[in-house]
Image (spheres, rainbow, N blue to C red):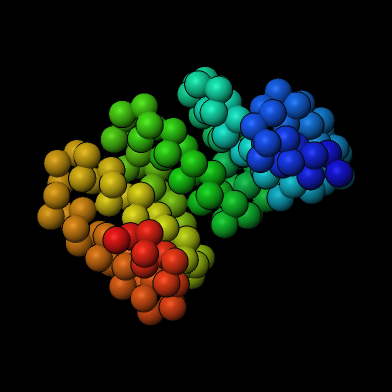
């Protein structure tokens, strides 16, 4: 229930209450040996920190979520957290860190045979490449993402890439 309340308050932009609920839920998830719930709560706390303008706290939470996911073998959650860290770095103008995090997320998704995760990672990677002046590489990367999404029938993903 605490996670649901946290998500509801997060959707309503009542950030302090959302954070408090996620913080309480993390402890319960840890005690219950529910790493997926723990990762979800810590990731949400990172996103809330970013929303309030505290990028270092956001990255700290998201890195903790990556660590929990990695220890538990939750590859999909790990890639989501890595992409979230990439977004924070992108918003801060750090294209090298953005590229590094999206690249790691892509590799994990590819190893785990998760083409949707890989395609999403490639789209973020292309943005980082473009901001680093790697225009032709970025076009190729984005085309790879688009082709994957087309093969998978992910019409919404294709539209997002356009």
Q: In which quarter of the view is residue 87 placed?
A: top left
Extreme-front residue of the structure:
12
Q: Can you give x and y, in whole percent of width and height, for residue 19 in the image?
A: 71, 28
Q: Residue at x 79, y 32 (%)?
A: 21
Q: In which quarter of the view is residue 24 placed?
A: top right
Q: In which quarter of the view is residue 73 placed?
A: bottom right
Q: Can you give x and y, in whole percent of width and height, for residue 68 in the image?
A: 65, 42
Horizontally, residue 86 falls left or right of residue 40, namely left
* Residue 42 seen in this snapshot: no
Q: Can you give x and y, in whole percent of width and height, for residue 56 in the image?
A: 49, 21
Q: Quadrant of the N terminus?
A: top right
Q: Residue at x 55, y 22 (%)?
A: 52
Horizontally, residue 132 falls left or right of residue 90, namely left
Q: Is residue 48 above or below residue 76?
A: above
**Who is closer to the viewer here, 59 or 104?**
59
Q: Is residue 134 above or below residue 64?
A: below
Q: Quadrant of the C terminus?
A: bottom left
């Amino acid at each position: 229930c605490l996670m649901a309340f946290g998500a509801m308050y997060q959707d309503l932009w009542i950030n302090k209450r959302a954070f408090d609920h996620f913080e309480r839920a993390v402890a319960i998830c840890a005690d219950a040996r529910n790493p997926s719930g723990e990762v979800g709560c810590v990731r949400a706390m990172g996103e809330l920190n970013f929303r309030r303008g505290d990028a270092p706290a956001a990255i700290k939470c998201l890195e903790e979520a990556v660590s929990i996911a990695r220890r538990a073998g939750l590859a999909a959650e790990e890639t989501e957290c890595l992409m979230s860290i990439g977004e924070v770095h992108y918003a801060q103008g750090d294209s090298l860190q953005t590229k590094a995090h999206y690249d790691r997320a892509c590799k994990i998704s590819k190893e785990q045979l998760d083409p949707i995760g890989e395609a999403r990672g490639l789209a973020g990677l292309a943005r980082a490449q473009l901001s680093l002046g790697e225009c032709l590489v970025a076009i190729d990367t984005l085309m790879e993402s688009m082709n994957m999404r087309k093969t998978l029938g992910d019409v919404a993903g294709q539209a997002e890439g356009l």
